[in-house]
Amino acid sequence: MLKQIIIGSLLICSTVIITISFFAAASGMFDFANKRLQSGLKHLKMMIILSGAVLWMLAALSTAVWIWALAFLWVGEFQTLEAAVYFSIVSFTTLGFGDVIISQEWRLLSGMLAANGFLLFSLATAFLIDFLVRIQDGQEP
């Protein structure tokens, strides 16, 4: 049990740090884009910047899923990358179909994965809402 908690905690910490790094990079990139786009096309500018931010957050969340999938392969829980990625996506989104389950030896990780996904989706949502508010107010994102 302690091994699962340590591995799960390290995975959560690493995915949170990586996702926050994506946030920081997004702020810089979209600040750059915001200055370059024509000021007269506010709706188009907002659409382009927000679309980029959404895709960038999707990349951040996908990276977290892949980290978990690779961890499941590393501990030997899954034999194929497809199964590890599928289980990670289903658990990360807290959907949890139950068609692919993990052994009792590693089952605590599935709960930690779901909590991590819920946390990162919440952070990404908050980031995107703040981003949209700043764009609408004419501030730098």
Image: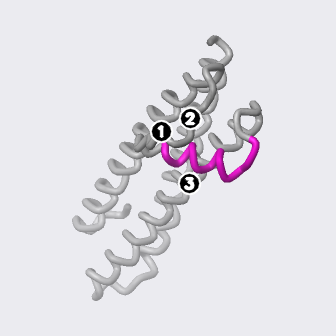
From the viewer's perspective, is residue 56 above or below residue 3?
Answer: below
Q: Name which residue type carries label 2.
A: Ile
Position in image of residue 4 (x %, y %): 63, 20
Rendered location of residue 119, percent (x, y): 41, 37
The residue under the point 51% across, 42% down is 99
In reply to whether residue 66 is colored magenta, the answer given is: no
Numbered tag placed on residue 98 in the rendering: 1
Say which quadrant the N terminus sits in: top right
Assign a secondary structure to mark 2. Answer: loop
Q: In the figure, is residue 128 to the left or right of 106?
A: left
Question: Viewer-nearest of labels 3 and 2?
Answer: 2
Q: Which residue is mark 2?
A: 101
| Residue 22 percent location from the top left of the image | 54, 53
Callout 1–callout 2 Cβ contact below 8 Å = yes
Pick whichever of labels 3 and 1 is earlier in the sequence.
3
Residue that badge 3 annotates: 62
Within 10 Å of disc 2 (Cα), the crowding (few <14, some 14-19, many 20+) is some
Q: Nearer the viewer, residue 53 or 45?
A: 53
Q: CA–CA distance between discs 1 and 2?
A: 6 Å
Q: Say which element carries label 3.
A: helix
